Image (cartoon, rainbow, N blue to C red):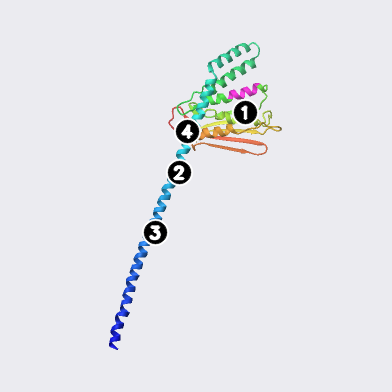
Amino acid sequence: FLWILQRSEPETELPAFEMKNKGKQFLLQLYISLYYFLLLLLSGFYWAILHSGKKVKENAAMQLALQKMETEKVYAEKQFLQSQVNPHFLYNTLNFLYAKSLPLSRELSEGIMTLSEIMKYALQKNENDKGMVLLSEELNHVQNVIRIHQLRCNNKLQILFSISGNTEGLRILPITLITLTENALKHGELADPENPVQLDLCCDDEKNNIRFSVSNRKRNGPKERSTGLGLANTLQRLKWTYGENFSLHITEDEHWYKSVLTLPLYREDSTR
């Protein structure tokens, strides 16, 4: 009996000891496995974030390159157009026609002179290093275009153009206001005295912005087809120049169309 007892004691103690060691080894292996799993998981997250950040930078660089190419393309097209039209020859010819037309028709001579000023502004804008012109010159260009349309229609067009605020020294992206104006002249009802085309420009020093609104009743009957490229190009140019610091809101219904352009106010002597 004692022999059996002596033989049985180690057999009952040894498995318990071994099980305890095996339990510790199992927990140790589990901790090590969890550690490497978490390390691998964190490495995967880090690689994914790094890779996505690299992609974002590559996409941003690609967008900047595309914008630069588009800007260079527009500039090249502008230079090509200007090289094809000799301004001096054009102005000399228009001045010659103006002088010849003076004895024949006052309206004809006025139209030729107005056309000369329009072409001069389009080909030789006095831009600063930011590509901006004086607001007064842009407004004069708008008024010249309206005057040409009035001459074509015997001054019967119903157009109201109001300007408020101090425009002295203000700068603006060229050929911006005229795009919205020409849209109204092309698609608006121009002969209704009760619903004239309204153009309002306000320079607000307190709000530090320029607000230009154009409102017109839609023309009845057949309408001219429009590609919308003029407005799309203007929007792109506005984004390049002003970034997010501008707004263009367009509202329309069955009878009316209105556009409101708001730009930051830049003066000639201002660094803003």
Q: Closest to the observer: 75 or 239?
A: 75
Query: Which residue is under mark 1?
Result: 160
Residue type at mark 1: give it. Leu
Mark 1 or 3: in front is 3
Given contact means CB atoms under 8 Å apart, are the residues at marks 3 and 2 in contact? no
State the SS at label 2.
helix
Query: Which residue is under mark 4?
Result: 68
Res. 93 in view:
yes
Mark 3 or 2: in front is 3
Q: Residues within 10 Å of mark 4 (few under 14, many from 20)?
A: few
Q: Where's residue 26, x and y in %?
A: 36, 68
Horizontal relation, residue 11 to residue 74: left or right: left
**In the rendered structure, which disc, 3 or 2, sits on the residue that comes first in sequence?**
3
Res. 241 in view:
no
Q: Where's residue 175, x and y in %?
A: 54, 28
Query: Which residue is under mark 2?
Result: 56
Residue type at mark 2: give it. Val
Query: Which residue is under mark 3?
Result: 37
**In the rendered structure, which disc, 1 or 3, sits on the residue that comes first in sequence?**
3
Residue type at mark 3: give it. Phe
